[in-house]
Image: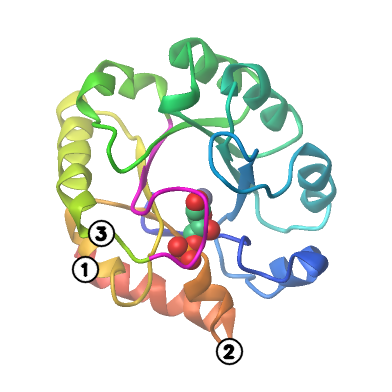
Amino acid sequence: MGIQITPSILNADLSRLADEVARIPSADWVHVDVMDNHFVPNLTLGLPVIEALSKHASQPLDAHLMIEDADRWAPAYAEAGCGSVTFHAEAAKAPVRLAREIRAQGARASMALKPATPIEPYEALLPELDMVLLMTVEPGFGGQKFLDLCLPKIRTTRALMRKHGVETWLQVDGGVSLETIERCAEAGADVFVAGSAVYSADDPDAMVAELRAAAEAAAG
Ligand code: DX5
Ligand code: ZN
């Protein structure tokens, strides 16, 4: 799999979700941020909205669960038809069991790390995961500034994936734009969430294409 662009709808017009998703036909996935006002200080949407949106989106949904008690709730997002389900390492009590449950429901299993959470303690879990999401801002809100301090962790994570010979995707999320995507791609990321960069553009789909071209050029 090459470079993939997964726009976040967090900063889209949430009153017109199906129309907003229709504006990004060339996106590989639609990234949906689920927040519970406990794991992060913000509240967005949950299963009923995801179920409704999945009937209208032509791309698979990439659910990013910023919720407590991920062990209890994450498998339902896979069951609801999300193509990929990401839980946070900081919120999962049994990440191996949870990843297996998500895969058993037919979805890709993914684990996210906040900026201050290291990847090394999770090295042995890599074969259980289809994707690792590295947050490049503190989770909770769109439109924040990219944290360059996360770049070494992107490199380390890619090196560990190579060491284990796994095909795990490496997604970055937070502050990804034309200004920052090249740094992420050079460091080894291959799946890029972009929220405000895409939905603040006059032509969101053209921005998806520009981001993809920039990442492909930087990844070589
Ligand atoms: C933040 C979310 C992100 C957010 C990205 O907690 O996980 O997906 O929507 O938005 P931008 O690209 O504006 O940082
Ligand atoms: Zn996200």
Residue ID at (64%, 43%): 34
Which mark sits nearer the N-terminus, 3 or 1?
A: 3
Which mark sits nearer the N-terminus, 3 or 2?
A: 3
* Residue 104 x, y percent position in the rendering: 61, 17
Question: Split into 4 quadrants, where in the image is the C terminus?
Answer: bottom left
* Residue 48 x, y percent position in the rendering: 84, 41
Residue 142 covered by magenta stretch: yes
Choose mark 3 or mark 1, whichever is in front.
3
| Mark pair 3, 1: CA separation | 9 Å
* Residue 21 x, y percent position in the rendering: 70, 66
Which amino acid, by three-letter code, is at mark 2?
Answer: Asp
Rendered image: mark on residue 218: 1
| Mark pair 1, 2: CA separation | 24 Å
Which mark sits nearer the N-terminus, 1 or 2?
A: 2
Write down the residue under mark 2: 202
Q: Which residues are magenta?
A: 130-144
